[in-house]
Image (spheres, rainbow, N blue to C red):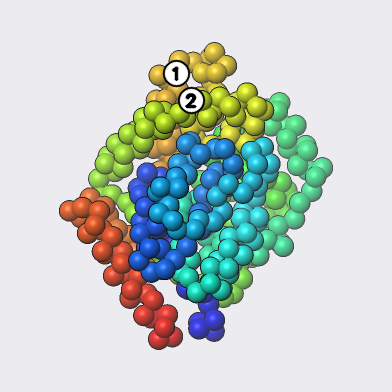
Amino acid sequence: MAADRIPLVCVCGPTASGKTALAVALAERFGGEVVSCDSMQVYRTMDIGTAKPTLEEQHGIPHHLIDCVDPGSPFSVAEYVYLAGQAVKGIRARGHLPVLAGGTGLYADSLLYGIDFTLHTEDASVRNRLEQELAVQGAAALYRRLCERDPQAAQTIHPNNKVRLVRALEMMEVSGKTLSQLKVESRKAPSPYRVLRLGLSFCDRQVLYRRIDLRVDEMMRQGLLDEAFRLYSSGFGKTASGAIGYKELFAYFGGFDTLEHCVGAIKQATRRYAKRQLTWFRRNPDTHWLLMDEYENTAELYEAAFRLTESFLREVQEA
C-alpha cells in the first residue's frame, strides 16, 4: 500500500549542476539525511576527482554511501542497491527524510524501482574469458560488441569502463538476454519508495559546460594531480581507470601526453558524460526539472525545490 512506502527525495542531473548542495539544503530544511548515488564516491581516497562533498560542504548533515569501499575492490550495482536500501531504512527509522543525490542513473533507477538482482546470474569462467579477450582485443572491441547486442545498455556504460563492460557481457552471455530485458524482468512491484524526483539542469547547455571546465580547473588547484598519482603508483589503476579525472592523467604519468592536454581531455570527457547523464534522466517523465539559469539566484531555485518538497510531503501525509 502507498502508506507503507518510504518517502524519498531524489536530486538528479548532470555533473557540476549543484546536486549535492541542493540535497544538503533539502536535508537541512526538512530534517533529512543524504544518500550518495555516485558509483565512484563509494571509494576511499578518491576524493577530489569524484567531487566528494567536504565536511564543510556537508553542513553537519549525515551522508551515506561515501568512503565505504577500498580502491581496487569491485563494487556492483547490486551491492549499491542493498547498502543504499539499508541506509534509507535506517534514515526512515530515525524519523528523517532520505535525500538521494547523485548522477549515476543506473544506481538511482535500480534502487528506486526496487530491482531484484537475484535474476542476474554470474559465471566465473565466462568472466575470466571476457577479461582475457579484454586484455588482447582492448576495451573498444568489447564496447562494439555491447553496442551490437544491446545499444540501449551501451548508452549507460562508458567505453573505457572495463569492469562494467565485462560484467554486462557476462550477464548477457550467461542469461541469453539483453541487459534491458533483464532490467524489466527484475523489477519488483511495487517499488518500496514513494519518490519526488528533482532534476537540475540548464536552458543553455554551454553554461553547464563552462561550469564543468571551471570545476576541473579547481580540482587541479585542490591537488587532483597528486591524488591521481597516488592511485596510479599504488596499483589501484584498475578502479580509477573507469573514473573520469583519473584515467586521463595516467597518460601523463606514463609519459605519453602533456599535462595540459590531459586536463583538456578531462574536461571533454566530463562534458560528454554530462550529456549522457541528461539523456538518461530525461527519459523519466516524473522528474520535476529545475533549470538553474531560469532563476535569478540559487536562493530562488532552492525555494522552488522547497515548495515542491513541501507539496510532496503533504501528499505523503494525506495518503
Q: Which residue is mark 2?
A: 225
How packed is label 1: few (under 14 Cα within 10 Å), some, or many (20 or more)?
Answer: some
**Residue 259: which disc?**
1
- The amino acid at mark 2 is Leu
Q: Residue most toward the right?
A: 125
At horizontal 26% and vertical 64% (from top left) the residue drawn is 304
Secondary structure, mark 1, is: helix
> Marks 1 and 2, how far apart in space?
9 Å
**Where is residue 164 drawn, in percent x and y?**
62, 43
**Where is residue 92 drawn, in percent x and y?**
53, 72
Figure quadrant of the N terminus: bottom right
- The amino acid at mark 1 is Leu
Secondary structure, mark 2, is: helix
Task: Out of 128 and 218, give the one closest to the viewer.
Answer: 218
At horizontal 48% and vertical 32% (from top left) the residue drawn is 245
Regarding residue 40, the answer to whether it shows in the image is: yes
Left or right: 293 in relation to 141: left
Mark 1 vs mark 2, foreground winner is 2
User: Are dots 1 and 2 in contact, CB under 8 Å?
Assistant: yes
At horizontal 53% and vertical 68% (from top left) the residue drawn is 91
Regarding residue 115, the answer to whether it shows in the image is: no
Q: How many marks?
A: 2
